[in-house]
């Protein structure tokens, strides 16, 4: 459970969120779109308590790509338009370019008319993630939340997506939950969560100086960053927790 959180994020900022599994990353971002409500204190967006927004309005301005992304049975285009019913093909293409999904879609014989099977089982995990990001972008959100949404995408493509987001949607506030330090190294600020509390929240440059967990992750993942497979990565997180688990 989360506790003692007090921070604010400026509109248009890109915020990276790092932390061990179970540290509260998903819980934290869930408070924004009100999947959960706070039991004490408040969460405000644009100076207004999230509980005072019309829920549809709030959820329309917050696009969330969850860890477990889903695609439904239908064409790629239909899946994309779930984000915005009346999106033109050109708008869909633009969103796919930003999410680095255009290349693989165009390599399919049926392109945007390719049929996706229930759950998206006929595309790879990384392709599925990119389609879900494109769909989230089509909603033209004020706040975009990516919860571990590029874990199945290679490091280079991940960097390309983050760069495109920064350049093409500078006004959108982005919250990027990641396992890889490389995913958040260009964020304006990075929040390090541990056991539901903020362990550090600063620019990546300053965190390297001041935050042990961040420094540990940088060391762990530097050099062969892209060689870490997911399992190995979570092992390191777990190791870290065991070694430093002094706060009960
Ligand atoms: N629906 C829920 N009901 C009760 N407790 C929950 C629920 N979801 C998560 N938790 C607890 O809240 C804490 C934070 O979970 P959360 O999912 O936010 O972690 P996380 O940082 O996103 O982890 P991961 O990297 O594995 O996704 C965990 O201790 C978890 O057991
Ligand atoms: Mg999570």
Image (cartoon, helix red, strand yellow):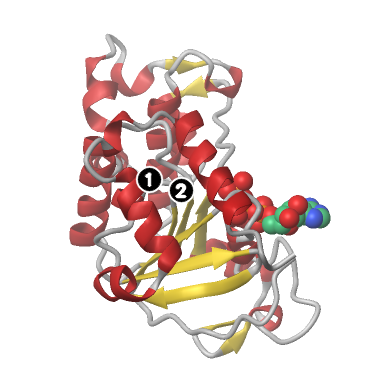
* Residue tagged 1: 87
For the point 21% across and 26% down, which residue is it?
A: 103
Binning the other alpha carbons within 10 Å of mark 2 as few (below 14), some (14 to 19) or many (20 upward) gives some
Q: Would you say 170 lies left or right of 213 here?
A: left
Left or right of 81 on screen, residue 182: left
- In the rendered image, the vertical position of residue 125 relative to residue 29, given as above or below: above
Q: Residue at x 66, y 67 (%)?
A: 196
Q: Position of residue 89 (x, y in %)?
A: 29, 37
Quadrant that contains the N terminus = bottom right
Q: Which residue is mark 2?
A: 84
Q: Would you place residue 31 above or below residue 179 in this image? A: below
> Residue 222 at what x, y percent from top left?
26, 45
Residue at left offset 23%, top offset 16%: 107
Q: Residues within 10 Å of mark 1 (few under 14, many from 20)?
A: some
Point out the residue furthest to the bottom here: 47
Measure the C-alpha gap from mark 1 to mark 2. 5 Å
Number of callouts: 2
Is the Cβ of the residue at disc 1 closer than 8 Å to that at disc 2? yes
* Closest to the observer, 124 or 216: 216
Asked if residue 94 lies left or right of residue 59, the reply is left
Kind of element beneath mark 1:
loop
């Amino acid at each position: 459970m989360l506790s003692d959180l007090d921070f604010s994020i400026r509109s248009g900022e890109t915020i990276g969120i790092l932390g061990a599994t179970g540290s509260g990353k998903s819980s934290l971002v869930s408070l924004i779109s009100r999947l959960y409500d706070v039991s004490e204190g408040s969460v405000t967006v644009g100076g207004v308590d999230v509980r005072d927004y019309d829920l549809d309005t709030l959820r329309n301005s917050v696009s969330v790509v969850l860890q477990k992304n889903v695609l439904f049975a239908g064409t790629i285009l239909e899946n994309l338009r779930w984000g915005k019913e009346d999106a033109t093909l050109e708008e869909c293409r633009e969103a796919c370019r930003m999410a680095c999904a255009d290349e693989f879609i165009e390599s399919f014989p049926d392109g945007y008319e390719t049929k996706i099977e229930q759950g998206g089982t006929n595309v790879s995990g990384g392709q599925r993630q990119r389609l879900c990001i494109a769909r989230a972008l089509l909603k033209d959100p004020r706040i975009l939340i990516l919860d571990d949404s590029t874990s199945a995408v290679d490091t280079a493509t991940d960097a390309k997506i983050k760069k495109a987001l920064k350049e093409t949607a500078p006004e959108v506030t982005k919250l990027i939950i990641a396992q890889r330090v490389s995913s958040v190294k260009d964020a304006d600020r990075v929040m390090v969560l541990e056991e539901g509390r903020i362990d550090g929240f600063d620019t990546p440059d300053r965190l390297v100086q001041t935050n042990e967990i961040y420094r540990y992750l940088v060391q762990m993942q530097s050099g062969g960053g892209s060689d870490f497979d997911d399992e190995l990565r979570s092992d390191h997180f777990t190791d870290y927790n065991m070694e430093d688990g002094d706060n009960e």
